[in-house]
Amino acid sequence: MARNIMIITRTPMRISYVGGGSDFEDHFKHSFGSVIGTTINQYIYVFSNDLSEVSPERIRFTYRQTESVDEILSIKHPVLRTVLEELEWESRINLGTFSELPSGVGLGGSSAFTVGLSHLLLHLKGMAVDPETIAKFSVRVERDLLGESGGWQDQYHSAYGGFRNYRFNSEGVQVSERLLTEESIQLLNKQQLLVWVGESRNSSTHAQFTQTQARRGVSEQISRNAQLSESLFTKLKMETSPKGQFELLANGVNEAWELKQEFTSEVSEQVKEIIDIGFENGASAAKLCGAGGSGFILILFEEQNLQSLRTAYHNHKIIFPKITSTGSQIIFSESHEN
């Protein structure tokens, strides 16, 4: 009898607080990059199953559409095609994916998909699936093989998980231990929210703008953002109280947002209005998540200001993200004989 294997990976999206833009290789190969962020309980799922012997195709992939093909080169989805080519995939396979949020919301979903897919297929090939291997492989797929604009932080966030600092330079990536105490995580879970701007966007378009700035050499603004992240990293390690860590983070987010507007594409009036409303109603910090354009706006706030913010944003969709401690995981694996 043939053996049938069903596997599901669950890979978290992320919030980037400070340092975004400095994780672009065109920047950090000349200097260094540093980002602070966390994974959250919004996930990308990828599943695989063996195709039935009666199925006419060799590869099936279900996402917003279904592709059924015999050859890898016939696959339209660029990431899947590239990963299968890189792994010299030979066996029949049935793959699919779904997400808890729409694409293009500024929370690293596209890279989370690449990480989750890579994790699953590396596992099926019997290869290493530690976070470093998965992150490096995913960066290679997106940045080198596909040539997509963007940084490296999303792949590392999704592979490692947790609230961490990532430092990038020409020699590699340094991953910190988790930065916040459990009490600080519990506090932050109660004192951050995401406001939906109302439309998703293609992050690569905005990433190209940032990459152009980075290619000009060591951009002063991007370098200052990396230095801000390094400084915040040091302060967070020294501060032990949840309130103190929250205040440091809020100050860092505000400063980073001011810097980021100097090297990203123009921020829409709608985004500016939502951020202004937040500060008028007790927000401690606010920033647009992701490469720019649209998606989610992060609001940090003191707990006593929550109701005021809820009222102010009554016409907007809001989610309350929770920090996760783990990156991409295999959450289901079952093998049985047909």
Image (cartoon, rainbow, N blue to C red):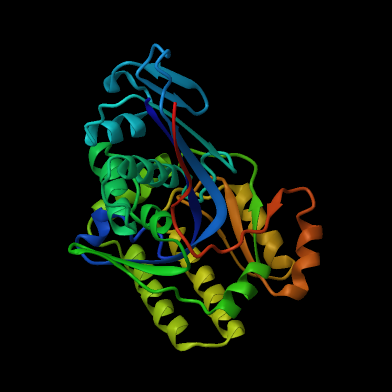
* Number of numbered discs visible in the structure rendering: 0
Q: Position of residue 137 (x, y in %)?
A: 27, 48
Q: Is residue 170 above or below residue 137?
A: below
Q: Quadrant of the N terminus?
A: top left
| Residue 323 placement: quadrant | bottom right
User: In the image, is 117 to the left or to the right of 172?
Assistant: right
Q: Which residue sits at x=52%, y=27%?
A: 64
- Out of 26 and 62, give the one closest to the viewer: 62
Q: Is residue 223 above or below residue 97?
A: below
Q: Position of residue 178 (x, y in %)?
A: 44, 73
- Out of 119 and 102, give the one closest to the viewer: 119
Q: Which residue sits at x=68%, y=67%?
A: 279
Which residue is most to the front? 1
User: In the image, is 304 to the left or to the right of 94?
Assistant: right
- Out of 333 and 48, give the one closest to the viewer: 333
Q: Which residue sits at x=25%, y=27%?
A: 90
| Residue 259 placement: quadrant | bottom left
Q: Quadrant of the C terminus?
A: top left
Q: Which residue sits at x=35%, y=48%?
A: 150
Q: Is residue 17 visible?
A: no
User: In the image, is 120 to the left or to the right of 244?
Assistant: left
- Out of 185 and 244, give the one closest to the viewer: 185
Q: Is residue 147 visible?
A: yes
Q: Is residue 234 above or below residue 331?
A: below
Q: Position of residue 152 (x, y in %)?
A: 33, 54
Q: Position of residue 238 (x, y in %)?
A: 44, 88
